[in-house]
Image (cartoon, grey):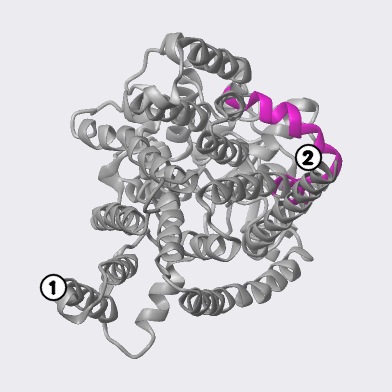
């Protein structure tokens, strides 16, 4: 009886520590991301969609808001009313907290299976979310930097190689030079300043509140359950992830199947277990079945350009077309693959001597999962030169590997650091160094959080891409024009026009339908709004043509657009002069009214 009471107490204590670790990771994510760029970029796209889905009377005449929900149906159903009741800003913050809680829970579960303590987990997350901090430190200690490679990285690299060659004579184990080599590679790798989480295709985990963020939270929980051997609950989590985001959950499920088959004798005990995994996954992914069937079997409208070509090469090339990536992106790929291999090598060198532990099995299991997740990525690279119409690339083959390789590399590198300390004194020294690094990175986030909070007190403001003149302009439109008035607005700029003015518009470059017919219609609307541009497969040229084309529209062209779409008003900058009646003007923007 006493033993049972002690066991229950241990379980309660363990749950308390797990809860505290989740809160610590949640705080880590929140200090940098919670109040940054709310209702901007992706949130300016998906949150108005969610609100309109549950309240069709809100801006009923907007073309984009009336698009079919597609794979976003579950997200829009669950959170549309929240956005409508609480407002965009509060809904964004509450939604981010929900998604960050899922992410934090998944990360802590994975760390527990890996045997990674909280200190080293946070260190891994700083390497993943703030790689530029480390590179900035290395570049700022007085050593010269050439491009993305600074001399401190080269010095560490040379030291590592020297210790490997002279290790036996100096009595240095292989672990230390391997870790030095990994450090030098971290300093060399460059994810890109615009979105540092992903490898090359701009994938991310915690930048905004949307279906993808929730899906990744469920995916991380599923990976933790996978490493623990809880395959049935894992399958249900992956099914739910697929219901929120088809590609995130779907690619992860295929990766997990490959992981299970890789060691089927120990991971798949019988076919009945595999059948249950499939059934639970299908049950969880019920909301994804309809959009998948529609995407695969809906007939494509007749058009000059295929919807897949428009999507891949004109709409989102940075995410799906390697031709649009920075020329040195492969440096990061090689660097992360080498760091991953080195980390696993250090873990192997320091493995238990007599019996392989569950922690060691989980670490090697995560390594295998990471490599399998890269198969679609590599397949996408192989197919890209030949997929001139984007038929395969439209399905984001780079998505999962783009985020899993950097994330899991950082986690396994932290594991390698943790197991490399041979003595208690060494472990304390390593813990002190990690604490100093975390302090150096995390403390500035408090100042950033305060600045973000101050900015949101003026919401909407610069964080939403709203300058005072634009705010005044949209307020006037919302207060002095009929609610059903259709307004022509710049196609490339002012993504926030719809939710700020609460008036329907024609189309926006960043507001992209997720169905074939919608993509064709979107492309034609962009052509109209930018004076019949010639579409090209270079992101900057396409965006520039959209912006320049709109700003060069003549009075006759503007009037023709208003007549074609039955629009009442035309928004542009004051430097764009048209011979149309002026409804309102401030120092930066002018609202023209349809003549007659």
In front of the other: 345 or 159: 345
Which quadrant is the N terminus positioned in? top right
Measured in 3D between alpha carbons, the distance from the residue under mark 1 to the one under mark 2, in whole angstroms, is 61 Å
Residue at x 70% of width, y 52% of height: 18
Question: What label sits on residue 165 in the rendered view?
Answer: 1
Establish if 38 lies above or below 262.
below
Chief SS of the magenta region: helix
Residue at x 33% of width, y 59% of height: 346
| Magenta-highlighted residues | 71-96
In front of the other: 570 or 240: 240
Q: x, y percentage for residue 199?
A: 37, 51
Outermost bottom residue: 142
To which quarter of the image does residue 276 belong? top right
Q: x, y percentage for residue 451?
A: 69, 73
In front of the other: 354 or 331: 354
Question: What label sits on residue 83 in the rendered view?
Answer: 2
Residue at x 20% of width, y 34% of height: 382
Query: Does the stretch in magenta take in 262?
Result: no
């Amino acid at each position: 009886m006493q033993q049972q009471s002690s066991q229950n107490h241990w379980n309660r204590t363990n749950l308390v520590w797990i809860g505290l670790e989740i809160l610590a990771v949640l705080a880590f994510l929140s200090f940098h991301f919670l109040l940054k760029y709310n209702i901007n970029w992706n949130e300016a796209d998906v949150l108005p969609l969610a609100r309109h889905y549950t309240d069709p009377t809100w801006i009923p005449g907007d073309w984009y808001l009336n698009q079919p929900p597609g794979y976003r149906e579950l997200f829009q159903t669950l959170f549309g009313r929240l956005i409508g009741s609480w407002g965009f800003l509060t809904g964004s913050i509450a939604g981010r907290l929900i998604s960050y809680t899922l992410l934090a829970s998944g990360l802590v579960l994975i760390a527990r299976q890996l045997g990674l303590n909280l200190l080293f987990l946070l260190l891994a997350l700083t390497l993943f979310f703030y790689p530029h901090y480390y590179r900035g430190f290395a570049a700022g200690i007085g050593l010269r930097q050439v491009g993305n490679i600074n001399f401190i990285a080269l010095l560490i690299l040379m030291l590592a190689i020297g210790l490997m060659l002279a290790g036996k004579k100096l009595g240095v184990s292989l672990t230390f030079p391997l870790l030095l080599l990994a450090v030098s590679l971290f300093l060399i790798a460059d994810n890109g300043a615009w979105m540092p989480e992903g490898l090359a295709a701009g994938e991310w985990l915690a930048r905004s509140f949307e279906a993808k963020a929730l899906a990744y939270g469920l995916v991380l929980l599923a990976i933790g359950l996978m490493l623990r051997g809880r395959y049935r609950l894992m399958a249900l989590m992956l099914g739910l992830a697929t219901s929120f985001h088809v590609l995130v959950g779907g690619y992860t499920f295929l990766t997990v199947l490959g992981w299970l088959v890789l060691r089927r004798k120990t991971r798949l005990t019988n076919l009945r277990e595999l059948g249950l995994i499939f059934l639970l996954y299908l049950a969880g992914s019920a909301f994804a079945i309809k959009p998948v069937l529609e995407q695969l079997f809906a007939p494509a409208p007749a058009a000059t350009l295929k919807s897949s070509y428009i999507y891949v090469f004109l709409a989102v090339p940075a995410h799906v077309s390697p031709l649009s990536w920075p020329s040195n992106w492969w440096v990061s790929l090689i660097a992360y693959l080498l760091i991953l291999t080195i980390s696993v090598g250090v873990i192997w060198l320091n493995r238990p001597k007599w019996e392989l532990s569950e922690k060691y099995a989980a670490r090697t299991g995560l390594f295998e999962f990471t490599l399998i997740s890269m198969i679609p990525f590599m397949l996408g690279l192989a197919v890209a030169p030949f997929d001139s119409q984007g038929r395969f690339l439209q399905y984001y083959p780079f998505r999962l590997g783009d985020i899993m390789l950097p994330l899991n590399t950082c986690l396994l590198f932290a594991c390698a650091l943790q197991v490399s300390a041979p003595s208690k004194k060494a472990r304390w020294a390593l813990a002190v160094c990690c604490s100093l690094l975390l302090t150096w990175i995390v403390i500035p986030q408090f100042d950033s959080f305060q600045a973000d909070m101050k900015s949101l007190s003026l919401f909407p403001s610069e964080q939403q891409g709203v300058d005072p003149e634009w705010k005044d302009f949209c307020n006037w439109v919302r207060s002095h024009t009929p609610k059903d008035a259709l307004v022509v607005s710049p196609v490339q700029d002012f993504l926030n026009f719809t939710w700020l003015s609460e008036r329907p518009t024609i189309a926006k470059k960043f507001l992209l339908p997720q169905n074939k017919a919608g993509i064709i219609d979107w492309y034609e609307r962009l052509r109209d709004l930018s004076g019949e541009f010639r579409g090209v497969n270079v992101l900057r040229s396409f965006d520039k043509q959209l912006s320049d084309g709109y700003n060069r529209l003549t009075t006759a062209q503007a009037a023709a657009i208003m007549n074609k779409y039955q629009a009442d008003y035309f928004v542009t900058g004051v430097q764009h002069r048209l011979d149309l009646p002026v409804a309102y003007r401030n120092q930066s923007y002018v609202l023209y009214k349809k003549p007659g």
